[in-house]
Amino acid sequence: MSEVVIALREIAKRYGAVQALDGVSLELRAGEVHCVAGENGAGKSTLIKILTGAIHRDGGDYEVAGRPVGDLTPAAARDAGVGVVYQELSLLPDLSVGENLLMGRLPARRWITRPAELRRRAAAMLERVGLGSLDPGTPVRETSLAVRQLVEIAKVLGERPRVIIFDEPTTALSADETGSLLAQIRRLRDEGHAIMYVSHHLEEMFEIGDRITVLRDGRLVTSAPVGEFDHDRLITSMVGRKIESLYPHTRRTIGAPRLTVRGLRPRGVGTPIDLQVRAGEIVGIAGLLGSGRTELLRALFGADPVAGGEIEVDGTRLPGGSPRRAVQAGLGLLTEDRKQLGLLLELSIRENASIASMDDISRFGLVDRRRERSLVEGLLGGLRLRSASWEQPVSALSGGNQQKVLLARWLATKAKVMMFDEPTKGVDIGAKAEIYQVIGDLAAEGLGVLVVSSYLPEVLGIADRVVVMRGGAVVGELAAEGATEEDVLTLASPSGRAAPGGPAQPAARRTS
Amino acid sequence: MSDAEVVPPEQAGAGGAGTGGAGVGGAPESPPAEPEERVLRLGDVLGRDAGGLIVLLVLFGGLTLASDEFLTGGNLGNLARQVAIFGIIAAGELLVILTAGIDLSVGSVLALTGCVTAQLLVHGWPVPLAILVGLLVGAALGVFNGLLVARAKLPPFIVTLGMLGIARGVVLVLTDASTIQPLPPSFAALANGSVLGVPNLLWIFLVVVAVTAFVLRRTVFGRYVYAVGSNPESARLAGVPVNAVLVSVYALSGLLAAVGGVLFASRLSAGIPTGGTGYELNAIAACVIGGASLFGAKGGAFGAAAGALIVGTLNNGGNLLAVNAFYLEIIIGALILLAVFFDQLQARRRAGAAGG
């Protein structure tokens, strides 16, 4: 058994009426990747905050290298060797990579910085995470998300930590980038760091984890070497009940075209896009990060100006250029970035759910409160949203529940065509199944549905048809049934790079 | 005053009657979950505006005890006249602040519109027509502000700072910096008369506040104002006509500044080109003391009105108790800091309770 670097014993933490953590014990050992799994609200974030000294525990012991410590401040935790790579990157976008790396201890002499020294030290730090070729003078704004993630790791490594905590590090990364990040983490483990890895992606835990601890409702459910888990057991212990099938099997009949797109050219894209979605059909859009999937949805919705093309909803031409007109014509868009592009954080759950249907629940500009309430209650009740009151601010909800509020917003508009951009990003597995169910139900009701997702099993699991994009253009189309992840990747990857999984065979059938 | 765990009375009532709606999805654990905890709090009744009213009540009680003159009809009428005009401006300012904007031009617009109306009266225009033109000028200046903010995407601070200078300059040029009088007595009666023993100014103030509160709470436009203030891009993607909302709030702010301008000219029976200087800061102070957040989406009309009354009452009470006016400025400044500090404290506590 390797050395225990940090041990938590019987940790308890309470926020008001909510017991966030209750008797949780955990050991982080040198040379071990310890995965922590659990749904949103299970207590993972609270655990991390206690480890880093961001909050103080109510009870239990915190030991570093066998010696109990009191209430740590964040600075003391850092000195004790606890480093965190945060889910939301903490880099300052307008400063250079080097300045970010050494922020707080910029090399200086009598308050005057020494640029050459900064460059030298930053370059050495970047070398450690395989970014030797990156110029430390590059502004962070100009680097990709994957590079920023590595810079963040380099920054944490600069503090010489013995424990590194990764909080959802792959949320924004593509499959490729995730692969190289995991390799990096494995390297850190082999160097003798103790790693704590928190993620919603179960595959990643199986890939790099040595031990998995599962939290549920603030309690420790189980903790065992990774070999003792399989996919089903892990999900069952996280959710506390068995999820029969993640992807719903709804009976659907595919009918007339609801959305027809001819020659659409989103901004900055040369190739016109043709697309059709029929009633009762779920069309998945797959592609690598930056392949133009989100841009396509935004162009359809009128959120960005387009260079040309026609959009028809139920045979009626949609006057473009305004989300308001798109909503009125029967389009709905569930955006990827909930906080920036979806939620109205200061407003209540009720107000968030009803904002897109004001025309339906008002008369002469007055909101009919009775209709508003019954609309919201019916929809959110149907989505099994748990909350003390609809008047709570939406910001008080967990990620999965916030997503349900946004779903309700669009269900309320009685849209004809629903577009989903990464609908399950940052959502726990229980809520995921419910969101898939809603998407399936919508299609069963005769809506046309478009789903963009980076998670291929999801696209293949819920869609009838998968449209693959690359470089802003539609490069192929597959029937979801029978298609494999390799088939999609083959189409999605730039030519010259073989897709993983052996010889690329053109399994795509061009159906249009 | 957190109402996060309390089922508001209207909501609790609907919970019993509206179970048919909630039962559509067969949801067993659908809220309201705590029907037994039906505590009626001040915050539930007054919604977003509760904080300022308490301070106001305390202030009124304290001054009544401290000074025999405070709670007399004459003094209260005085207070109402002092507060009304900049309370009306504060209502317009509030609309802009709720969209996370700011309108620095209201003081200058007040002077310009007041003088335009006065000038027309001097030229023998009928009173209603002169007032109408004054109001239209205010609204037009507001539309101009709004278009620059919404269409040209200029920062509201800059746009209205520019208008502050332009409107003030225009009124000084038009009047050659001299007072415009005499005005007809029928015009002066507007702000100086009273109905049922209550000064007209107070009536108008109350109507403006009531209408603003109603618009914000019950109309689609009001809902859109809060949505835009919360996150304009989210609001746009939910089908909210963000630009129209922005132009409207600046137009209304300009219009209400013009209402203030007309009443100001009427009260003094003269067009004063330097009038209203610094009123924009008083209006902003009233909103902030009344619980509005400069980051938008937080605050209400009764709060802003309470804020205006607090500032006015402090001034009035200070005079009665012969407190040095310079000290009053310090007190009002400190009050702004205190109001915002308590807001932050509350928000932090709420975030702490919700986190995890």
Image (cartoon, grey):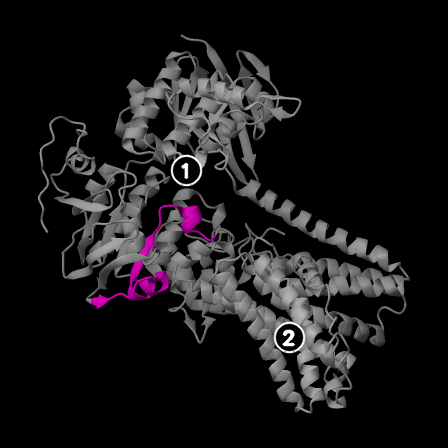
Q: CA distance from mark 2 to mark 1?
A: 52 Å
Whole-percent x and y of residue B255? 60, 74
Task: Give the residues drawn in magenta, as a range.
Answer: A316-344
Q: Where A26 falls versus B29 (above or below)?
A: above
Q: Provide the residue designation for mark 2.
A: B258
B23 or A85, nearer to the observer: A85
Chain of the residue under label 1: A
Q: Residue at x 16, y 52 (%)?
A: A251
Q: Provide the residue designation for mark 1.
A: A40
Check disc 2: other Cα within 10 Å, few if <14, some if 14-19, many if 20+: many
In this image, B48 relative to A132: left or right? right
Whole-percent x and y of residue A310? 22, 61
Q: Residue at x 32, y 59 (%)?
A: A302
Circle 2 SS class = helix
* Residue A75: quarter of image: top right
| Residue A245 in view (yes/no) | no
